[in-house]
Amino acid sequence: MGKGRLEAFSDGVFAIAITLLVLEITVPHLEEPGDLGQALLDLWPSYIAYATSFLTIGIMWINHHSVFRQLGEVDHRFLFINLGLLMCISFVPFPTTLLADYAWGGDGTSAALAYGITLTITAIFFNLLWRYAAWNNRLIHPNADPREVSGISRAYLPGPFMYALATLVALLSAEASAALFLAIAAFYVGSSSFFGDEQAGF
Amino acid sequence: MGKGRLEAFSDGVFAIAITLLVLEITVPHLEEPGDLGQALLDLWPSYIAYATSFLTIGIMWINHHSVFRQLGEVDHRFLFINLGLLMCISFVPFPTTLLADYAWGGDGTSAALAYGITLTITAIFFNLLWRYAAWNNRLIHPNADPREVSGISRAYLPGPFMYALATLVALLSAEASAALFLAIAAFYVGSSSFFGDEQAGF
Amino acid sequence: MGKGRLEAFSDGVFAIAITLLVLEITVPHLEEPGDLGQALLDLWPSYIAYATSFLTIGIMWINHHSVFRQLGEVDHRFLFINLGLLMCISFVPFPTTLLADYAWGGDGTSAALAYGITLTITAIFFNLLWRYAAWNNRLIHPNADPREVSGISRAYLPGPFMYALATLVALLSAEASAALFLAIAAFYVGSSSFFGDEQAGF
Amino acid sequence: MGKGRLEAFSDGVFAIAITLLVLEITVPHLEEPGDLGQALLDLWPSYIAYATSFLTIGIMWINHHSVFRQLGEVDHRFLFINLGLLMCISFVPFPTTLLADYAWGGDGTSAALAYGITLTITAIFFNLLWRYAAWNNRLIHPNADPREVSGISRAYLPGPFMYALATLVALLSAEASAALFLAIAAFYVGSSSFFGDEQAGF
């Protein structure tokens, strides 16, 4: 299988998962007229969860593209690691809803844990995907720049640890954990925009 | 990253967001048989909201394509401005439901404000995207026609102001505001069809 | 705008609309355990509505492709007629749910009318799209086969009338009308499979 | 119609169906705060059903690609067999929800039967698709390797029987049947990863 079709299929799954996030935001059903404005303001956790997951999936899509640019070919194991990664990405809308509905309340810890565990596993799959391809240049394109390849290897390493840490923070404070997930995404966007550091990765 | 993949991913998000709009229209649950015809007629605000958002997203897709046709390359900041724009486009189904469910009732102002603020921010991101690319021809293709480039710059300028104005009208009348959002889309379709004015933009 | 991107975007909308149809089928919520088998059998109108709409949208996608194969270029009016067609295609999941939930009951006529009116308008847009392109060979590719072009013109003509007729039958019997919508799709699949008559169209 | 567009459209339907699976997992509505952790653990049948269907559709996508790689052209009958296959793939989210909600309970047999019948019919369509194309090399590319073609024919044959068997097991035990569906997918991933046996198929 050429890498082109695999990339197109993966792009489709990324695009759909990112667009389904909006279904997480529930339209308020008002008890009585006149309360819509307040009800919409009270939905702020949904907007934050939406933005956090949208940026996170968007960044992962950019990184997925960086990985594929270095590839010369793909094999069956790579295909299935990629399927595992897509299974995580597709799953994100569910813990996003949990985060939106429960992170700022009595069940915040469970919600932030569910969200964080999902992103941590996703980041692990991301590293698996890259390290499987890069190991002894197994699937790397002959013309790939070795410095770029080792740069990606270095840049993707901290991702799982950062997410695992933000997940553990949920045991102390769900709000702090949720804020960290947004901060990780915002930090990536910021550093990548200002320094053009495209390997700053997950 | 080549502009081709970015455009394909963006097209996917546009196509999915525009198709998810139909989920906004709730199938009536009847108290007793025989009322379906009336219930379907009573859903007219949903049909109007559907058409308004469908045309608006469709026009923005056409404009997005006009922007990309002028580009020679993309950089990381452009990538993230585009991600911000897609985050707005993907969000549109939510305020569309608000508009459909509440614009013609006691909560109309809040609903129309939510819808209008979303479209205004979207139009601002659209201008940001274009102006970032066009500033000193930063990302413009060397062979691009300078008159076409400055034509787009002129044409996209009024968009945020038109939407902001239609949003402010919601403070006086939600119905008038909703009608203006549809009128803006219809005006664009009309002028663009009859004068072939493809830069008449948002 | 090249016809390639417009076709890819349209394909996306067709693919999403056809796949969203499954959301119409509601998972039964049982009063008491042990009734699931019967509840699933009682959903037969949903399965029929699903198959009818899936085949109808699938056939329209095939015909849409036949139209685009004859085109040399597209213009802005064509773009907006195509947007109108996509607006109808995207809308189909809603009347499909109406058909599934109400066609075999006291509100059958309203449901079948809603379904039929949607398909009739869709078929009208399809004819508009083609006739706008084919009029004086406005957008037809210079190398297109004139016999094929006039064959499509002839083949698409009956579509709106067939759907309008099946819609009117709903005034007499909603079940007969629903059966006709399925029969039209099955007839097209059959005739097109056995005679290779690819212009047998809507 | 070229096989390229048909493959792109099919890829779209596969990608959307696989991503819609997450909507099957219902966010718990808690009676009282503090129970979210337990409620999320109690959703384990949903996670298993999600993984089973995700892997199964993913594998079918890989196999679909193997089929298309051997093709030189497509005809109308092939087009409609493919449409039938996509109709099955798109349907999978519905029985997946049934499996998740009912397989481990009093209605398990009905749920597992519904799931198994869907996969069995899908596997039959898959065989129809391939055998229609491969019969007397009807649609096979002139340069295709005959050994690869007959390898696919052999490999796809057991699929319907395996699924039918796992479906029949539901009459004895729904849980065993559900476990078999996951085992079939896991077996394929495993054998295909370790032996590179890309024709091990459905």
Image (cartoon, coloured by chain):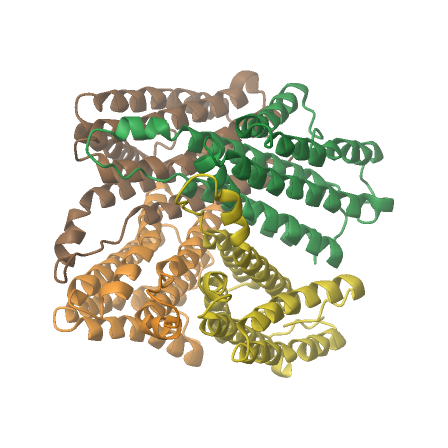
Chain colours: A orange, B yellow, C green, D brown
Seen in the picture, residue D91 relative to D38 is either above or below; the reply is: above
Which of these two is toward me, C112 or D47? C112
Lateral position of residue C149 relative to residue D153, left or right: right
Residue at x 50%, y 26% (from the top left corner):
D145
Q: Position of residue B110 (x, y in %)?
A: 45, 73
Seen in the picture, residue D28 relative to D155 is either above or below; the reply is: below
Q: Where is residue C136 in the image (x, y as percent from the top left)?
A: 87, 45
Which residue reaches farthest top?
D136
Which residue reaches farthest bottom?
B136
Residue at x 32%, y 73% (from the top left corner):
A42
Q: Where is residue B21 in the image (x, y as percent from the top left)?
A: 50, 55
Lateral position of residue A42 relative to residue A64, left or right: left
Lateral position of residue B39 relative to residue A36, left or right: right
Tell me the quarter of the image containing the N terminus of chain A.
top left
Q: Position of residue D86 (x, y in %)?
A: 47, 34
Picture quarter containing residue B200? Answer: bottom right
Which of these two is toward me, B57 or D55? B57
Picture quarter containing residue A162? Answer: bottom left
Can residue D88 be seen in this snapshot? yes
Residue at x 35%, y 52% (from the top left corner):
A90
Which of these two is toward me, B84 or C186? C186
The mark tally for this picture is 0
Seen in the picture, residue A191 relative to B46 is either above or below; the reply is: below
Residue at x 38%, y 23% (from the top left corner):
D155
Can residue D143 be seen in this snapshot? no
Tell me the quarter of the image containing the C terminus of chain A.
bottom left
